[in-house]
Image: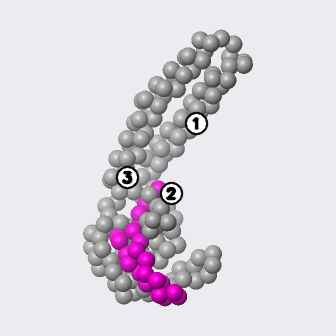
Amino acid sequence: MTDDVVMTAQDANKLEAVLQRLQTSGREEIARRIKTAREWGDLKENAEYHDAKNDQAKLETEILRLRDRRSRAEIREAATATDVVGFGSRVEVLDRADGRAHLFVLVASTEARPAEGRLAFDSPIGRALNGAALGQIVSFTTPKGERTFEITAIRGG
């Protein structure tokens, strides 16, 4: 598995906007809080100062994390073809064990929301579905055992 972070161009734009906000207004706000707290005197027992410095450390850590994600980003466009499942596909499946139908969208791991049917394309289910064709049966292992799905519909992203 690669260390790249797969995302759409839209996801990359969102990441860039958050990073820009943190590097500008986020840093400015922390600097104001530190300046104000310093004006209150003794820094050893100044809880506001220590809180602001802790928040500054968290902010800088988040900026570094986002910069790292941006540097490793691999931009992919959502699949538009409907003959095979790919990144961005909307996939309808039939659970062969209980007969229930499910709708999944294969997304970047940073956008995954399993409870909403948004699955990371590199998750066990995502890997099983990726590249599968309409009518194909796919299997994958979960902590509760083997699962089998039949692909009943594929729509592009």
> Circle 1 sits on which residue?
58
Residue at the image position 62 percent from the left and 31 percent from the top: 54
> Circle 2 sits on which residue?
3
Q: Amino acid at mark 1?
A: Lys
| Mark 3 touches mark 2? (CB < 8 Å) | no
Q: Amino acid at mark 3?
A: Asp
- Residue 11 is marked as 3
How far is the residue under mark 3 from the one under mark 1?
A: 23 Å
Q: Amino acid at mark 2?
A: Asp
How far is the residue under mark 2 from the one under mark 1?
A: 24 Å
The disc, 3 or 1, on the residue closer to the chain's N-terminal end is 3
| Mark 3 touches mark 1? (CB < 8 Å) | no
From the top left corner, tell me how far across and down residue 40 is, in percent.
62, 12
Secondary-structure class at tag 3: helix
101 relative to 124 in the view: left or right: left
154 relative to 2 in the view: left or right: left
Q: Is residue 121 visible?
A: no
71 relative to 77 in the view: left or right: right
From the top left corner, tell me how far across and down residue 100 is, in percent.
46, 83
How far is the residue under mark 3 from the one under mark 2?
A: 17 Å
